[in-house]
Image (cartoon, helix red, strand yellow):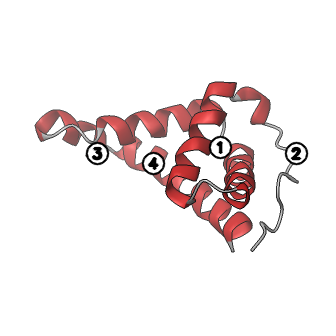
Amino acid sequence: MAPKDPGGLASTTRADYPTTAISDYVFACMATNGETRQALQQCSCSFDVVASIIPYDRYVEASTFLSMGQVVGERGSLFRESAESKAAIGDLRRAQAEAEIRCFE
């Protein structure tokens, strides 16, 4: 099944994302969804959707909260349970859900 809008989103915020962030996102997505040409198209589309919804700074913030939230104990709980972390992660999750609908269904 081909993505509904493969690469067709001309994101206004995509230019704010460094190439390494784009590559990391697409490689991680492909590791999860298969390393096929179709997965490459879908994951690239997914990135475009995410980048069109949240700016890079918010993406970094949410990614940091997710990463640091994996630390066990009290230190990790600060990154998992604060209102700011929940809001940033929620923004990223909503963008990813929209990308799932647009690119993978």
Name the secondary structure under disc 3.
helix
Labels 1 and 2: the sequence-earlier one: 2
Labels 1 and 4: the sequence-earlier one: 1
Q: Is residue 41 above or below residue 101?
A: above
Q: Nearer the viewer, mark 1 or mark 2?
A: 2
Q: Which residue is mark 4?
A: 89
Labels 3 and 2: the sequence-earlier one: 2
Marks 4 and 3 close (CB-CB < 8 Å): no
Quadrant in the picture for the C terminus? bottom right
Q: Which residue is mark 3?
A: 80
Labels 2 and 4: the sequence-earlier one: 2
Q: Amino acid at mark 1?
A: Ile
Q: Which residue is mark 1?
A: 54
In percent of the image, x 60 and y 53: which residue is there? Answer: 35
Crowd tier of the residue under label 3, counting other residues whose Cα lies within 10 Å: few below 14, some 14–19, many 20 or above? many
Crowd tier of the residue under label 1, counting other residues whose Cα lies within 10 Å: few below 14, some 14–19, many 20 or above? some
- Give the Cα distance between marks 2 and 4: 24 Å
Residue found at the very far left of the displayed protein: 73
Q: Which residue is mark 2?
A: 10
Q: Is residue 90 above or below residue 82?
A: below
In percent of the image, x 73 and y 66: which residue is there? Answer: 102
In percent of the image, x 61 and y 31: which residue is there? Answer: 21
Q: Residue 4: x percent and y percent?
A: 81, 68
Q: Amino acid at mark 3?
A: Arg
Crowd tier of the residue under label 4, counting other residues whose Cα lies within 10 Å: few below 14, some 14–19, many 20 or above? many
Residue 51: quarter of image: top right
Name the secondary structure under disc 2.
loop
